[in-house]
Image (spheres, rainbow, N blue to C red):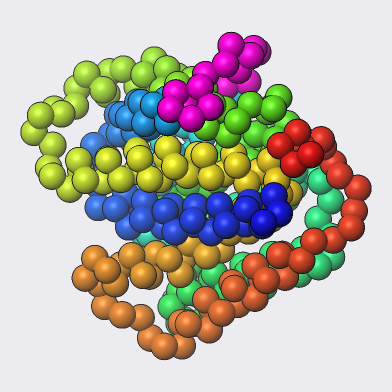
């Protein structure tokens, strides 16, 4: 299997795992401060990924070179998660998911600015098709729901979080110096945890950890292990093998995965017509699977 194919499989798994954080995050957003839960999830994820690194590649001393790289990456992803939870306090999940579909386009722009990655006409068409399909799923094939969409304070807060997410993707490729994905992820998580602890120390101390509802602990463990630790590795693995626009295009599958999550959690099954949007997102990904011949924007040591 080619490095590019492995990158696509990684992002397919990523989109499914991230979808779960939307479903669970909406249930716990108002039960714990964003700073406290994000610091805790980074701490747990750091332990998980650190253990995985020790059992696989180890933690070579060379990975500690230029630690400022981890501060930049950790700060970007910590910003995304904190603003996501702040946004979900007031923004309906449907509106937040709609904002999330802007990330691939912003990532394509960031990829050009940072790496001079070029989004070809076919890739642009695929991104457009994927966006249309995602919006169709998000609004459950209800045109009136789409036209009634309004931008509120929560959506604006979450938008800036998505900007940080979009910048993070090409920044991984720019700052990586050949470190394995699991090692690079560990450094990013540790740096993010330190930054969040310093920034949100008062909220962390004020949280009554012993008496948090069970759903908060379930959500915390899920977002720490699956939606943070594992997804970090998957994104960094994929960004070393795929252009940023292709990596973030998989976010278009998230609304479809969210529907499956909601059904699994007991929510009503959506109308059959909604499936048309899911088909469009799959069509977009098929278009992106085809490799185009174009100059490489940056060296990829893992693909050589």
Tell me where residue 230 sits by quadrant.
top left
**Residue occupying image coordinates x 39% and y 15%:** 198
Q: Position of residue 225 (x, y in %)?
A: 35, 40
Q: Position of residue 28 (x, y in %)?
A: 24, 47
* Front residue of 6 and 282: 6
**Residue occupying image coordinates x 19% and y 27%:** 207
Q: How many marks?
A: 0
* Front residue of 3 and 232: 3
| Span shown in magenta | 53-70
Q: Is residue 139 left or right of residue 174?
A: left
Q: Position of residue 255 (x, y in %)?
A: 46, 66
Tell me where residue 302 sits by quadrant.
top right
**Residue occupying image coordinates x 25% and y 52%:** 27
Specify whether residue 56 is painted magenta: yes
Task: Name above or below for residue 259 compared with residue 208.
Answer: below
Quadrant for the N terminus, please.
bottom right
Examine the rendering and report whether any part of residue 29 can be seen. Answer: no
Task: Name above or below for residue 160 compared with residue 255.
Answer: above
**Residue occupying image coordinates x 57% and y 44%:** 235
Specify whether residue 212 is painted magenta: no
Which residue appears farthest toward the bottom when viewing the image?
Answer: 272
Task: Name above or below for residue 13 compared with residue 290.
Answer: above
Quadrant for the C terminus, please.
top right
Q: Position of residue 211 (x, y in %)?
A: 8, 33
Q: Is residue 8 left or right of residue 121?
A: left
Q: Is residue 175 left or right of residue 100?
A: right
Examine the rendering and report whether any part of residue 288 can be seen. Answer: yes
């Amino acid at each position: 299997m080619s490095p590019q194919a492995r990158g696509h499989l990684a992002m397919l798994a990523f989109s499914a795992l991230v979808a779960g954080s939307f479903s669970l995050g909406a249930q716990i957003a108002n039960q714990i401060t964003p700073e406290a839960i994000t610091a805790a999830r980074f701490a747990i994820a750091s332990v998980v990924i650190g253990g995985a690194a020790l059992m696989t590649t180890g933690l070579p001393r060379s990975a500690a070179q230029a630690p400022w790289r981890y501060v930049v990456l950790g700060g970007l992803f910590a910003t995304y998660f904190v603003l996501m939870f702040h946004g979900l306090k007031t923004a309906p999940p449907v509106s937040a998911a709609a904002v999330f579909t802007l990330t691939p386009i912003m990532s394509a722009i960031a990829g050009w600015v940072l790496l001079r990655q070029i989004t070809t006409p076919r890739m642009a068409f695929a991104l457009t098709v994927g966006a249309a399909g995602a919006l169709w799923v998000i609004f459950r094939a209800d045109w009136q729901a789409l036209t009634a969409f309004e931008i509120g304070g929560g959506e604006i807060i979450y938008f800036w979080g998505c900007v940080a997410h979009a910048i993070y993707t090409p920044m991984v490729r720019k700052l990586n110096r050949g470190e394995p994905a699991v090692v690079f992820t560990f450094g990013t998580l540790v740096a993010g945890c330190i930054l969040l602890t310093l920034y949100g120390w008062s909220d962390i101390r004020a949280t009554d950890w012993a008496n948090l509802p069970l759903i908060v602990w379930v959500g915390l463990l899920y977002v720490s292990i699956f939606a943070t630790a594992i997804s970090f590795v998957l994104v960094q693995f994929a960004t070393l093998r795929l252009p940023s626009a292709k990596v973030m295009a998989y976010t278009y599958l998230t609304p479809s995965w969210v529907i499956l999550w909601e059904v699994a959690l007991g929510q009503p099954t959506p109308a059959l017509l909604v499936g048309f949007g899911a088909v469009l997102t799959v069509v977009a990904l098929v278009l992106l699977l085809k490799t185009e011949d174009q100059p490489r924007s940056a060296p990829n040591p893992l693909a050589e």
